[in-house]
Image (cartoon, rainbow, N blue to C red):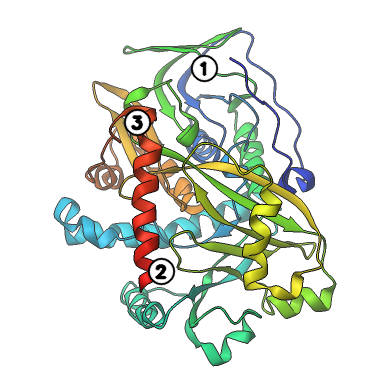
Amino acid sequence: MSFNTQHTASYYAATARDAAPYPSLDSELTADVCVIGGGLTGVNTALELAERGLSVVLLEARRIGWGASGRNGGQLIRGIGHDVSGFARHVGQEGVRYLKQAGIDSVELVADRIARYGIACDLRWGFCELANTEAQFAAFKDEQDDLAALGYRHETRLVGAGQLNEIVASDQYAGGLVDMGSGHLHPLDLVQGEARAAHSLGVRIFEQSPVLRIEHGPRLTLYTARGKVRASSLVLGCNAHLDELEPRLSGKVLPAGSYVVATEPLPEALASSLIPQNMALCDQKVGLDYYRLTADRRLLFGGACHYSGRDPKDIGAYMRPKVLKVFPQLANVRIDYQWGGMIGITANRFPQVGRLGQHPNVYYAQGYSGHGLNVTHWTAKLLAESIALGHSQGLDVFSAVPHLTFPGGKALRSPLLALGMLWYRLREALG
């Protein structure tokens, strides 16, 4: 197996507080649970299991936080899917309410974990959804009312176009919805801090240890190049990087490329003029823009979505026009970092969580479709509950949502979704 095993050259990798490596597996181990994947899903499942007293081995093919968990925009935003109300016929109205509440509680779970384990990850509160059209801005009132009906305890407020310069120095938007219960952080510091917390509780973590083969049964055996693990339960937390390790799951997720740039550090006056209240921001386009300031006053700007499996030749050149459309005042600002990564997209934009068919001791969570920073923590909690206690009502709700397998395997998954996205972009352009 040949692939890049080190972190991509991102802003996060360059500024990570503690990137000390873990060893590669070179022995035979036993555990209650083996977790495959050192991203937010795998690390937090391992941590939740260790908190419940189970013995855990975590195997990561590359480095902790190597994938989307350590490359994303760092926006810690409530929500779990694009339209959970549409799942009422599968989960009922109580199930819909549970899913909406989980989208809120998952953010609180992240905040609690940061506080409990003293994880330094530049957490800042404040987020503004930006409307590209008047119709989108009008819909924000319904969203605000929905939050109030759920008993949302954080401040929300509608901001019209005339006052939006208090939030962002751009003329691209029709208004915004401020949410002080969402925010932004350094995601690689978060997942590495959570891995240290799990390790302190006895989780045995191994990097550079890709799993080559799984023998199923009441006791599972997982083989790496130089070792193996025997466990009673297995958690697959590989998301867009599952590949052919479990084709029944990989066919339900489309790996899609998303791209981010970070500017040079901005003068304090310029940085505070761009985003005066240091919030996370994202718009409502199909291929949305998302951006924020970093702790050292860089603009971190992400967006676009590629389904071809090929990255742009020059991510900085590809992203610069998007940055300048929002902030033309940055025309002479240098881009210091540019990177991309794969996110797991599902056909219904809702995460897939459950057990693997005829192998009830194999659990999985994947396909967060852009909501991974918070929702990974919630699905990890549900998986750990189910393994430790034998049942999780929340897991039952998630598992009740049906998911399609993309037809045609790898050859057709990307073109089909690309055509679908083109259709939505055309509708967006035509109003």
Q: Secondary structure at mark 3?
A: loop
- The residue sitting at the right extreme is 267
At 43% from the left and 61% from the top, the residue drawn is: 286
- Between 92 and 243, the residue placed more toward the observer is 243
Q: Mark 1 or 2 closer to N-term? A: 1
At 43% from the left and 59% from the top, the residue drawn is: 105
The label nearer to you, 3 versus 1, is 3
Disc 3 residue type?
Answer: Gly
Q: Mark 2 or 3 closer to N-term? A: 3
**In the image: residue 111, left or right of residue 427:** right
What residue sits right under mark 1 in the picture?
A: 211
Q: Position of residue 277 (x, y in %)?
A: 66, 78
What residue sits right under mark 2 in the picture?
A: 429
What residue sits right under mark 3 in the picture?
A: 251
Q: Is residue 149 visible?
A: yes
Q: Position of residue 148 (x, y in %)?
A: 35, 78
At 62% from the left and 17% from the top, the residue drawn is: 2
Q: Position of residue 342 (x, y in %)?
A: 53, 40
Q: What is the C-alpha distance between the residues marked 2 and 3?
A: 31 Å
Image: 159 above or below 130: below
